[in-house]
Amino acid sequence: MLHKTKGIVLHTLPYNDRYLIINMFTEAFGRVAYIIINSKGKRSGVARSVFSPLAILELETERSNTRELQRIREAKPAFLPSKIQTHPFKNAIALFLAETLYRLLQEHEPNAKLFDFLCNSIRLLDITDAGTANFHLAFLFQLSNYLGVHPNAETYKEGRCFDLLNGVFTDTLPGHDHFLSREDSLAFERLLHINYGNMSLFAFSRKERNSIISHIINYYRLHLTDFPEIKSLAVLQELFD
């Protein structure tokens, strides 16, 4: 049966010499793995070049409940970015976010609010210059709301430390190792209020930003299953003084 939907490219993987497997988060079906012919030209309306990380595509697909890998009849850009693929910083952010979403988004069910958030975020990444160094921080803190694991900011009081395992700020040290120092907890609490509108107001050194992103990744890893190392993080950590 043919279906039309929008989709966001998360990951591509060669499948022998002839095919590519494209993992996407779609508006109609949630996460879906598609298989396409690995060709530089167009075959059956599909060109390999459109499947760049975080590309937003209009898709016409064949869908069968008996197949693990679905087929794409046609794919074309729903949004044409002007900077994500050519700006080195934005490209590094896109690679990191695509890999992170590939690991985090496992549900094969539609989630309209999450899909809209992701599309709006990708468009903003392309056009926004102020605060670009903090974009991935704002993205991950806001994403936690859609995944149901947002830290409880209401438990913060001055001097408390953040319990990564339970997602709350506490007066006493937890009986486990998954907590932040009081200094790091203060920075973490500030970032619970970050968004795309105010991210340019947050000033961090490279060391501070790398520490924060490590804490966020650790927090996600504690609350969501099957979240391995993000390989593109190392590239991102070399940027943005």
Image (cartoon, rainbow, N blue to C red):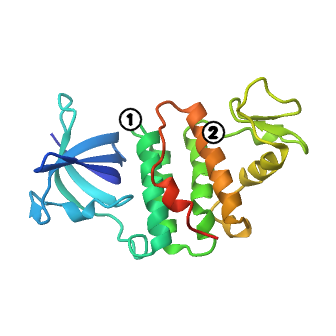
Residue indicated by mark 2: 219
User: Residue shown at 56%/36% (left/top)?
Assistant: 221
The kind of residue tagged 2 is: Tyr
Return the residue nearer the eye: 19 or 200.
19
Residue that label 1 marks: 109
The residue depicted at 50 percent of the width and 74 percent of the height is 127
Q: Nearer the viewer, residue 32 or 215?
A: 215
State the residue lying farthest toward the top: 175
Q: Quadrant of residue 62?
A: top left
- Tell me which numbered mark, 1 or 2, is placed earlier along the sequence: 1
- Considering the image in quadrants, where does the C terminus appear? bottom right
Q: Residue 233 vs residue 23: left or right?
A: right
Compare residues 111 and 208 and report the one nearer the observer: 208
- Which residue is drawn at the image coordinates 55% and 64% (left, top)? 238
The residue under the point 67% across, 52% down is 212
The answer to whether the residues at label 1 and label 2 have Cβ atoms under 8 Å apart is: no
Residue 67 spot, x, y in % from top left: 18, 32
Which quarter of the figure is the N terminus placed in? top left
Disc 1 from disc 2: Cα separation:
24 Å
